[in-house]
Image (cartoon, rainbow, N blue to C red):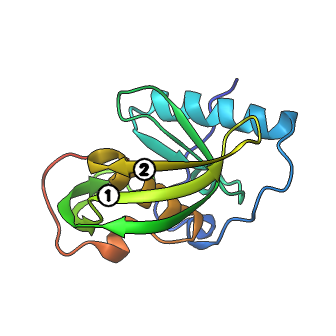
Amino acid sequence: MALRIIRTDDDPVLRKKARKIEEINDRIISLRDDMLETMYDADGVGLAANQIGILRRIVVIDIGEGPITLINPEIYDEEGCQKAAEGCLSLPGATGQVERPQKLKVEYKDIDGTKKSMEAEGMLARAICHEVDHLNGVLFIDRAEDEDDEEAGA
C-alpha cells in the first residue's frame, strides 16, 4: 500500500468523468488499498479515484462502520431529503450546506467483482452521493447552498 497525493482545488482531473472499470485485477485491488490508506491518513470518510488523479469508477467510504468499496456505483433510487454541512479532502477548508437524499439504493461491484445492491441512509447515503458526484466531475461546492464554518470531511 502507498499514500497517494490528493488532488486539490483547481486540478482539472477533479472535473473529469471517470471511466468504468471493466476488469477487477491486481492493479484495481492495489488502487483500492492505496485509496483506503490515503483516506485514513487524511482523516476522511470517503475518497474517489479522481481525487488521487485516477479516472476510474471506484470509491472507498468509511463512516466509522468499516470500509466499503464501490466499483462502478450507480444510484438508482432516492428517497427523502437531508441538508447538512459537507467538506472535501480536495477542497481543504471549504464547507457548505448541501441537500442530499435521506435514503438511496446503489448498485455496484465489490472488490471481488460480485454485483451487489445496497440501501443506505443518513451519513452513508450522503457519503455515497458525494463520492459518486466526484466520479462524474461534480464537487460539493457545485451543490452547496451557502458557505458554512462547520468542519466536515468527505
Inspect this view and state whether residue 88 appears.
no
Give the residue at mark 1. 103
Q: Secondary structure at mark 1?
A: strand
Where residue 98 sits in the image (x, y, percent)?
24, 66
Where residue 119 sits in the image (x, y, percent)?
42, 50
Quick check: marks 2 and 1 in contact, CB under 8 Å?
A: yes
Comparing 60 with 15, the one in front is 60
Q: At label 2, which amino acid type do we have? A: Glu
Is 143 located above or below residue 123 in the figure? below
Dot 2 or dot 1, earlier in sequence = 1
Q: Residue 15 sits in which quadrant?
A: bottom right
Give the residue at mark 2. 119
Classify residue 105 as left or right of residue 146: right
Q: Residue 62 sits in which quadrant?
A: top left
Q: Secondary structure at mark 2?
A: strand
Residue at the far left in the pictured view? 149
Inspect this view and state whether residue 138 appears.
yes
Classify residue 62 as left or right of residue 111: left
